[in-house]
Image (tube, grey):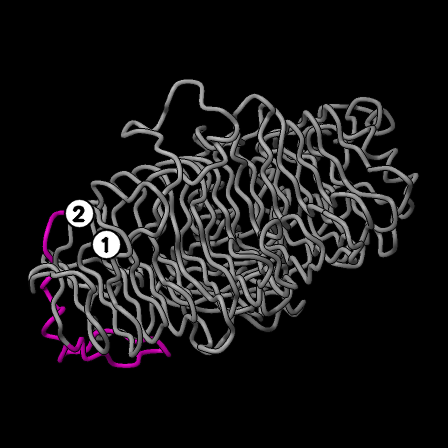
Amino acid sequence: MIRRTKLFTVFACACLLPALIPAAPGYAADAKLQVPASAVTASKDDGNVPANTVDGNLSTRWSASGDGEWIKFDLGANKKVSYMKMAFLNGDTRTSKFDIQTSTDNVSFKTVKANAVSSLNAGLQTFDFPDVNAARYVKIIGHGNSVNAWNSYTEVEIYGEGAEGVPVSTSAELTAAIGKAVAGTTIVLADGTYTQDAPFVVSGKNGTANSPITIKAANPGQAVISGGASLKIQKSSYVTIEGLKFTNTGNTALLLDGSNNIRVTRNQFALPATGKDLIWLQVSGANSHHNRIDHNDFGPKNDTSPLIAYEGDGKGNISQYDVIEYNYFHEVGPWVDNGKETIRLGLSKVSLSNGYNTIQYNLFENCDGEPEIVSVKSSGNTVRYNTFKTSKGGLTSRHGHNNEFYGNFFLGDGVKTEQSGIRVYGNDHKIYNNYFENLTGTAIHLDSGSFDGGTGGYPPNPTLDQLRAHWKIYRAQVVNNTIVGSKGGIVIGSGKAYAPQDSVVANNIVKNSTGTLYNEAATSNTVFEGNIGYGSTLSNKSRTASEIRNADPLFQTVNGLQKLSSASKAAIDAAVGTYSYIKEDMDGEARSSAHDIGADEYSTASSFKNRPLEKTDVGPDAP
């Protein structure tokens, strides 16, 4: 809605205002939002830099000539934005024209005021627009002034709500504030420790997409949930948990129970060891969907059980359309044979349900808990653009069907044991555009199964023991991957009863100095085409050159990765077959009409959309 001061003029007596205009729940009155100089950027400048617009000095300015040049302000988090004040160079002798836009993600911007025109005034002028309930980025797009094409702003102030919210500083105050929360409420935790003998419970609370209920730390990482406390969100929606630190003992730190559209962002999970099974973040219950777990720090973890576990609703269904992204998972161990996954996406009893969940842009570093760092135990999910660095174990589709694994980087050190890549069971999985280097285990394993779930994958009334079994693989596709300097390449089958069936291994590059590059450990009808191998034993079966060719890919080192060079004639434009889902390479660059072999499409570029992630790319402090 438009700022309340516009409405006040209809009332004759100012003393009636508090009764007539109730305060929005959970927010203080509109206030100037603080924007540091480092958070202001622009399309260009003439030496009068963007930071000048927030220095409180009308004698300095940002200037850029041209229709469409812009200046952008990062508020640091989503906040309610109500209006702006701006001052202009020579504002008393010429008018300036511009648009105001807002965005939550720095990608999609919405125009909230178009073709605004300043008045003849050298001081700050107010520009109002309908309140934006959630905006992190505010952009001003200049259209010049009444004299020339210059956009010159001496000062910009952004006003809104959410900078304060409902302040709490004790456990009792936090409990009371949660009880009173409604859509739009922001509860702000002062620095300190919040503890009690039971969880803080958010139950039956429903925000909206534009007005979520937010529980956040005033200063990220300084509001600590400790002792016997934890946080439980049940039968709720549109709730955001932001900037907290969980160090509680003996309980799941955060439980999302039968809730949807919950965002867990920029928190630290650092629970002390108890010597017992302990899940740190659990997602379960009916009506769970569209949750987002992003920019958190998880670790170190010594106890068994996963850091993040999806448990289902008790009726065979898993949470759907959730996203786990930009998190830092680290220092998990010591190693056990089973039960210390970093992420477990489902259970055997929900494995035949479609999750449509996405795990992307996460960094797993020294995650040495067990053979399955990420264990997918449900169907229809995507795991992409993650980096696994010096971690024992690998990414496994342990149960379920129709999962996709692409654009991931598996980077070993060649020393630590059990550093592996991708292993799958079940039907119709796709493994493509992944990069594996210096692994001490197998890079890609299409394993044999101990139970045949059938070509359709949905046998009638499977028993719990059958659901827990390793299911026979049908129709897996392993396409356009690159494996270098690793102990194991691509392995088909094992000693279990049911070898993979109707699968394809195509257009991969394996360049290792040891082992069998394409190892068929079981006899199957797997189709091989367009693959390259070099540096060791090509295959343990008789394969033609059109299936697996012995050729040096002649890599070059680009940003630490082994990629195609101009001399890589064996790989460039040499891919065969039709795999229409492969439109980009591991870097996020478009594939040419004639695809190259391997994860990389040859390019002369030196910077790329997708690359191995570093610690600065993920976690609470990342952009």
Query: Does the rendering let one see residue 592?
Result: yes
Mark 1 residue element:
strand
Pointer 2 local density, CA inside 10 Å: few below 14, some 14–19, many at least 20: few
Residue at horizontal 46%, vertical 69%?
Answer: 63
Toward the viewer: 186 or 598?
Answer: 598
Toward the viewer: 192 or 532?
Answer: 532
User: Measured from the top left, where is residue 222 in percent x and y?
Assistant: 80, 59
Magenta stretch contains residue 555 = yes
Q: Identify the residue position indicated by label 1 in the image.
A: 479
The stretch in magenta equals 552-579
CB atoms of marks 2 and 1 within 8 Å: yes
Residue 285 falls in image quadrant: top right
Mark 2 residue element:
loop
- Asked whether, in this view, residue 480 is left or right of residue 263, the answer is left
User: Measured from the top left, where is residue 31 in percent x and y?
Assistant: 73, 48
Q: Identify the residue position indicated by label 2 in the image.
A: 579
Toward the viewer: 105 or 139?
Answer: 105
Position of residue 532 relative to residue 211, above or below, is: below
Instruction: Determine which of the numbered discs, if any, sits on residue 95 in the image.
Output: none
Q: Quadrant of the N terminus?
A: top right
> What is the CA distance from the residue labelled 2 to the residue labelled 1?
8 Å
